[in-house]
């Protein structure tokens, strides 16, 4: 089904159809959490809802299907993605957002593209989707959830860094292969926040 425009209700219905029940519940949780964070950080609430609704749109399909979409549309696959094709749901999802759900705003597309590994220098919307994915009310498993949920509404970058650190710890413990982008994002924000702290100290504010 091709969308004529990216109407919120249409996208929600399309997700209800294409996702399994659990993933659809998660998707609604991410969309509402992203909307709340968009209010806090002065980002377009509509964009936050669209990106939240679509971020896992390629999650409930087989690896074979994801790989075949990539082949058909000349979407490059790196070694890590070849060995861990679930990672492709972000890349394929961002493609479907444009191709099937008619999203044209590059910020929304990027928020879907980078929602699993992050990237250095993310936009506010990209950070919001990354963080919402981790803290939405349906998530139960992750460590430090209570603290990260509070932090998300106080300092988005601190929440982002904590999530990246905990994700790297989890991957290390579970033997998951780490995408270099996940580490690169962590290193970038650790430096970035270190700098911020340093400059506050210089100002005598810390
Ligand atoms: O799709 P969701 O489950 O809602 O969330 P997600 O797209 O952030 O995927 C979460 C999983 O991705 C989580 O188990 C950690 C994993 N992940 C994040 N970065 C990396 C990674 N997995 C691997 N193998 N390598 C990474 O760098
Ligand atoms: Fe995801
Ligand atoms: Fe998700």
Image (cartoon, rainbow, N blue to C red):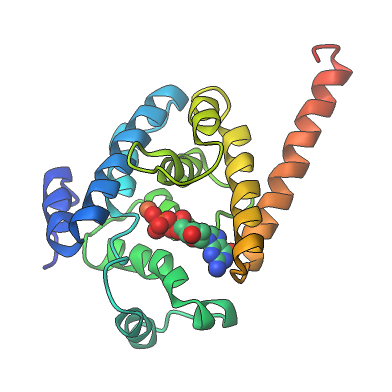
Front position in the image: 197 or 63: 63
Residue drawn at point x = 61 percent, y = 71 percent:
177
Residue 109 seen by the camera: no
Question: On screen, 161 above or below 18?
Answer: above
Question: On screen, 151 above or below 169?
Answer: above
The N terminus, quarter of image: bottom left
Q: Position of residue 33 (x, y in %)?
A: 35, 34
Residue drawn at point x = 63 percent, y = 33 percent:
158
Question: On screen, 132 above or below 167?
Answer: above
The C terminus, quarter of image: top right
Residue drawn at point x = 53 percent, y = 82 percent:
83
Please state if 40 lies on the left or on the right of 58 as rendered. right
Q: Where is residue 76 in the image (x, y as percent from the top left)?
A: 49, 81
Q: Position of residue 49 (x, y in %)?
A: 29, 40
Hey, which residue is sitting farthest top in the picture? 204
Count how many numbered circles sit on residues in the image: 0
Which image quadrant for residue 110?
Answer: bottom left
Please state if 124 lies on the left or on the right of 55 as rendered. right
Front position in the image: 154 or 114: 154
Q: Position of residue 204 (x, y in %)?
A: 86, 12
Please state if 131 lies on the left or on the right of 164 as rendered. left
Residue 2 seen by the camera: yes
Question: On screen, 116 above or below 135?
Answer: below
């Amino acid at each position: 089904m091709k969308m004529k425009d990216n109407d919120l209700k249409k996208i929600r219905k399309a997700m209800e159809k294409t996702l399994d029940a659990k993933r659809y519940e998660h998707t609604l949780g991410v969309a509402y959490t992203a909307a709340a964070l968009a209010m806090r950080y002065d980002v377009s609430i509509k964009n936050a809802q669209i990106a939240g609704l679509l971020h896992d749109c390629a999650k409930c399909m087989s690896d074979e299907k994801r790989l075949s979409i990539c082949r058909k549309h000349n979407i490059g696959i790196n070694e890590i993605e070849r060995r861990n094709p679930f990672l492709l749901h972000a890349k394929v999802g961002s493609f479907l957002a444009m191709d099937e759900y008619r999203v044209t705003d590059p910020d929304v597309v990027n928020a879907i593209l980078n929602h699993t590994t992050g990237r250095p220098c993310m936009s506010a919307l990209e950070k919001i989707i990354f963080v919402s994915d981790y803290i939405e009310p349906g998530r139960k498993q992750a460590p430090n959830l209570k603290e990260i949920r509070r932090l998300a509404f106080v300092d988005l970058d601190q929440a982002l860094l904590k999530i990246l650190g905990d994700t790297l710890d989890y991957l290390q413990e579970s033997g998951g292969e780490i995408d270099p982008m996940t580490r690169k994002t962590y290193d970038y924000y650790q430096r970035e926040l270190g700098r911020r702290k340093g400059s506050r100290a210089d100002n005598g504010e810390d």
